[in-house]
Image (cartoon, helix red, strand yellow):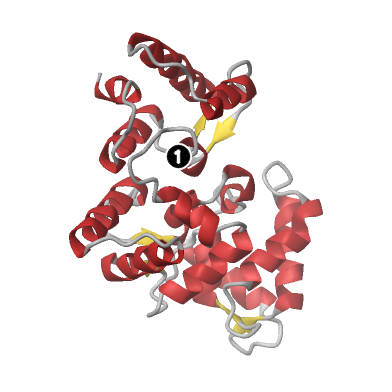
Amino acid sequence: MAAETHLQGVEISAAQFFEIWNHYDSDGNGYLDGKELLNFIQELQQARKKAGLELTPEMKAFVDQYGKSTDGKIGIVELAQILPTEENFLLFFRCQQLKSSEDFMQTWRKYDTDHSGFIDTEELKSFLKDLLQKANKQIDDSKLTEYTEIMLKMFDSNNDGKLELTEMASLLPVQENFLLQFKSVKMCGKEFNKAFKLYDQDGNGYIDENELDALLKDLCAKNKKDLDIKNLETYKKNIMALSDGGKLYQRELALILSAEQD
């Protein structure tokens, strides 16, 4: 098995890292949990032993934290922290920019330059180039193109050659990725349009912070299993980071609620 073979390596390439992630995230939901995570830990230990390598301190801490319970959940950034990759560019996102969901939303607005609701190849390449420069990593254009292609392979779940907000959010640590909680709060186009008009109480074409507060309170009440009213202020702050000077337009809100506008 290629993924297990890669785990035996002293140094893993970015492409091999992608193969490992893709193999163990068997259901493609963007994180490893339950049996996926336990299988990874078991095969990591076996692969290192087979290669005559000790677990690194980071690996040992990881195994201690996640190896005895089926309740664990990790994202791609957490995995990148323990595997010895040759160019661990995934960590640059967390170290340089994406330390919280709010940072992520602000970064999204910066690089989704045409406000299309997704980041295309050229926008993603600019994103990577800036982050690598901030990390004092100088790479040539061919390597930048390679990284861009790998990023698309990792996160472009619907294979349309672009990254949507929820796909790009896989760069966040699981505990910071509030968008995972909103995955189950989906509306069809007509339902979403109706809801937007309802909460845009003054009919000015956008939702302000107070109107968003009312919307989120109702969503929390209707989706208690997925959304926690105690996190209301965090939800609101993160979503308003997408706004244009405090004006949250329909297109931006649709990104959060995974709704297709008619």
Q: Is residue 164 above or below residue 58?
A: below
Q: In the image, what residue occupies the spot 38% across and 67% down?
A: 127
> Residue 99, how many percent across, how many down?
60, 57
Q: Is residue 58 left or right of residue 76?
A: right
Q: Secondary structure at mark 1?
A: helix
Q: In the image, what residue occupies the spot 33% across and 36% down?
A: 17
Q: Is residue 201 left or right of residue 105?
A: right
Q: Amino acid at mark 1?
A: Ala
The residue singled out by tag 1 in the image is 80
> Residue 113, how many percent across, how many down?
40, 79
Which quadrant of the structure image shows residue 54?
A: top left
Q: Looking at the image, which is closer to me, 248 or 199?
A: 248
Which quadrant of the structure image shows residue 88?
A: top left
> Residue 109, how many percent across, how many down?
49, 74
Residue farthest toward the left in the current orientation of the protein? 142
Which quadrant of the structure image shows residue 52?
A: top left
Q: Is residue 88 above or below residue 123?
A: above
Q: Residues within 10 Å of mark 1 (few under 14, many from 20)?
A: some
Q: How many marks?
A: 1
Q: Name the quarter where the C terminus is drawn.
A: bottom left
Q: In the image, what residue occupies the spot 61% across and 59% down?
A: 101
Q: Is residue 34 above or below residue 156?
A: above
Q: Name the quarter where the N terminus is drawn.
A: top left
Q: Is residue 137 left or right of residue 209?
A: left
Q: Is residue 179 left or right of residue 156?
A: right
Residue farthest toward the right in the current orientation of the protein? 230
> Residue 160, how many percent across, how many down?
26, 57
Residue 187 visible, this orientation: no
